[in-house]
Amino acid sequence: MLRYIDSKKMGRSDLGWLKSHFHFSFAEYRNPANVQFGVLRVLNDDQVEPGTGFDRHPHKNMEIISYVAEGELTHTDSMGNSATLRRGEVQYMSAGTGVFHGEHNRGQNRLRLLQIWILPDQQGLPPDYGDFRFDGSARENIWLPIAAQVGDSDSSAPVRVHADIHLYVTLLQQDKRLNFKVSEGRQAYLTLIEGEAEVSGIRLFMRDALEIVEEDITLNANAGKDAHALIIEMART
């Protein structure tokens, strides 16, 4: 089963310094029929202007992954971590019993990032942080493993979260195609970060998404456009 989500109908926010598309209910966008998809609670597509950002604030009992689509993301937190990430790089934070962090755009250009919150499989875990820098070509025409569950020995993903998920990204070159298997009892959420693509006759444009339930798909990059996509696979609920 496939369900298409049109980015033009997503929740939106424009604070001047921050422009956001909300895949699920968040901040001022409240939709009781669209709170989460499985353990995927938040997927925000944020654009942050230079010299601005999210000042230090708390989180608790949430697995948080940030994927940088363009620009620079500078992270600081109460655990003493500090890092700057760029296009295609990833940071992970397990908020656990509680952590304060800030996320800013210290660069000269607009920052665009995907902010992903996953519901953990247990509460009260020790807070943790990590960041990973991938070679730009590592995601070309394959599903590059980014995140998987702690203890999942079948995955090579460097990010480990306390939830039964697999997160992949791809940069699919124009006219290429790539299969993805969603097994019985599983579901996946795909969003097109950049470019144009097609899945089972459904045209996807930047920020569009698909809910995929127990169905194998083929992602086709349209002629003249590469397709930069992210997919989160998880147990069906």
Image (cartoon, rainbow, N blue to C red):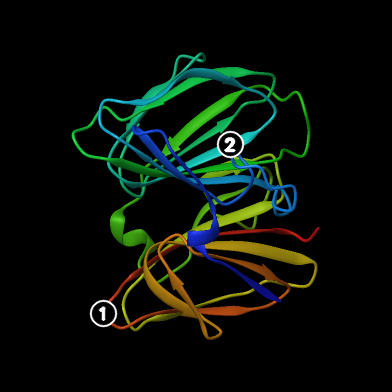
Which of the marked residues, 1 or 2, is nearer the chain's N terminus? 2
Q: Residue at x 51, y 58 (%)?
A: 168
Q: Quadrant of residue 64?
A: top right
Q: Is residue 4 above or below residue 135?
A: below
Q: Residue under circle 2?
A: 28
| Quadrant of the image containing the C terminus | bottom right
Q: Name the spot of residue 136 as percent of width and height, x first.
A: 30, 56
Q: Amino acid at mark 1?
A: Gly
Q: Residue at x 59, y 78 (%)?
A: 217
Q: Amino acid at mark 2?
A: Glu
Horizontally, is 179 left or right of 140 in the view?
right
Q: Is residue 27 above or below residue 153?
A: above
Choose mark 1 or mark 2, whichever is in front.
Answer: 2
Q: Residue under circle 1?
A: 224
Q: Residue at x 72, y 38 (%)?
A: 120
Q: Residue at x 26, y 79 (%)?
A: 224
Q: Name the spot of residue 225 as percent of width and height, x first.
A: 29, 74
Element under disc 1: loop
